[in-house]
Image: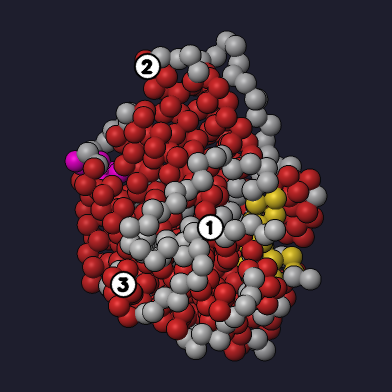
Amino acid sequence: MGQRPNELTPYASPQHYLGAEMRSRRNECGLSLAKLQARIRYDYSYMARAERGDQAASAALVEAYDQALKAGGALIQLHREIQNGADVDHLSRGHVAKAGPHVANSQAALVEGLDTQALSDAEGIAVPCRTSDGRIIFVSVPRRVFLGGIGAAAAGIAGAPLAQAAPPIPRTPLPDRNPIEHLQAIRRTLIDSDNLFGPRQLIPKVQEQINLITALREGKRGADRRNLLQVQTQFAELCGWFHQDAGDHRAAQYWTDRALQWSHMAGDPDLTVFILARKSQLAGDMRDPVEAVDVAEAAEDSAQPRTRLAAVAATYAAHGHALRGDEAECKRAYDHARDLLHAAEPDPGSNWGVWLDDAYIDAQRARSLSALGKFDTAAAGFRTAIAALPSGYHRDHGVYLAREAVAHVGNRDAEQAATIGMQALTIGVETGSARILTELAQLDNNLRRWRTVPAVREFHDSLNASVLHEA
């Protein structure tokens, strides 16, 4: 007997409402999730999470559903309204959700929370795969399979330096060293490795440290326990960042939410503010403008006056305004972020937001300008930010290059876009960064009309040769 589908809660949020409508349309067509997956070639677990409302459905996924289920543009229109900020009440008036079995139609229905169990070896690692229609999707492969075979093959295709990306890390603290100092040294090693080689091989290692700290907390009291909670929070936030860069937004949300919870337990208000700002950044990557702005504003309101953390939060809020298409508010928010940065007082005791400078704000502003269609200014902004990027930020260099390339093609400079795209691709296959490869997939699609240009064809062929392909 098949497993009963989870009950949906369409009135919990616009994201849940869209997911319920997607499942309802699928059920009306008499298609199981597996049968629809075979038609549209998206990752099965991603489709299931989108239908449950656990993960925001991308515009491309909604379009694939709409076409496969012959929805006549209804799902696309619903997604567009949600992106423009429509709430559930508006959606329920404007759309008739044909709720099938297992759909809770009452607004009083309880929202199922995130799975509180830690991600296991059965959870997936996203591997880039080129579909038959030219998209790049990230196929979920079980972690134990990835580390044992398929992942190694995929990395071989990409040419990623797996051995270098996995520095040996002791599993237990050294007996003659303060465990907090030892754990912080491990965290710095992981951060340095991520900057150079990307997150793929580091995710299991950071989770090992989280499990180790959980064991160390047992029996501790007072300051010792709070200090361990604080460093565990930092590792959880780092784990969320690794998953975010690897393209697994569900896992990124899980670990960032755990970090937020532990930061309150640790009693570290600055750390709480930083994680709220990171949640805004993640929402921006997921193209959720409402969440990006609201969480960033909460972070700024909670930040201590004249600190860099307030400037970090304002920077991510600005991109949320860009995703909403509000150019004036976006500009105001970036100016505000820069004012906060310059007014911040030095704080030698804080490590949060020390990387924020004018060049970082310039890079984020360029991304927002590209989202607003200001491609010429965006390309120049990325070029300035790349020139100011400190050495060692190898992966971020690739992200900026990929976004600059997308801005150039938006400005109809196809040859320059392809040339810079090739530079970004080299870094993308070295680090396995989903942020880079997603931008390059968009670039490749936008360059389609110029495919006869030699540089464009070279980029297209190189991208195809650097990822797996669906069977």
Task: Give the amino acid type for the residue marked by disc 2 in the picture.
Answer: Ala
Task: Give the amino acid type for the residue marked by disc 3 in the picture.
Answer: Ala
Q: Toward the viewer: 210 or 420?
A: 210
Where's residue 121, x and y in %?
68, 42
Secondary structure under tag 2 reads helix
Q: Is residue 273 above or below residue 453?
A: above
Q: Is residue 19 visible?
A: no
Looking at the image, is mark 1 or mark 2 nearer the viewer? 1
Label 1 or label 2, whichever comes before in sequence order: 1
User: Is residue 309 found inside the magenta-colored segment of the image?
Assistant: yes
Q: Toward the viewer: 176 or 95?
A: 95
Where's residue 357, x and y in %?
35, 50
Q: Which residue is mark 3?
A: 86
Q: Toward the viewer: 198 or 105?
A: 105
Q: From the viewer's perspective, tell me whether residue 385 is left or right of residue 23.
A: left
Q: Name the image quarter holding the N terminus.
A: bottom right
- For marks 1 and 2, give the CA distance: 42 Å
Q: From the viewer's perspective, tell me whether residue 262 is left or right of residue 196.
A: left
- Residue 382 occupies which quadrant of the picture? bottom left
Looking at the image, is mark 1 or mark 3 nearer the viewer? 1
Dot label at residue 6: 1
Secondary structure under tag 3 reads loop
Q: Is residue 325 above or below residue 452?
A: above
Q: Is residue 379 above or below residue 109?
A: below
Other residues around mark 2 within 10 Å, as few (<14) / some (14–19) / many (≥20): few
Q: Which residue is mark 2?
A: 223
Range drawn in magenta: 305-310
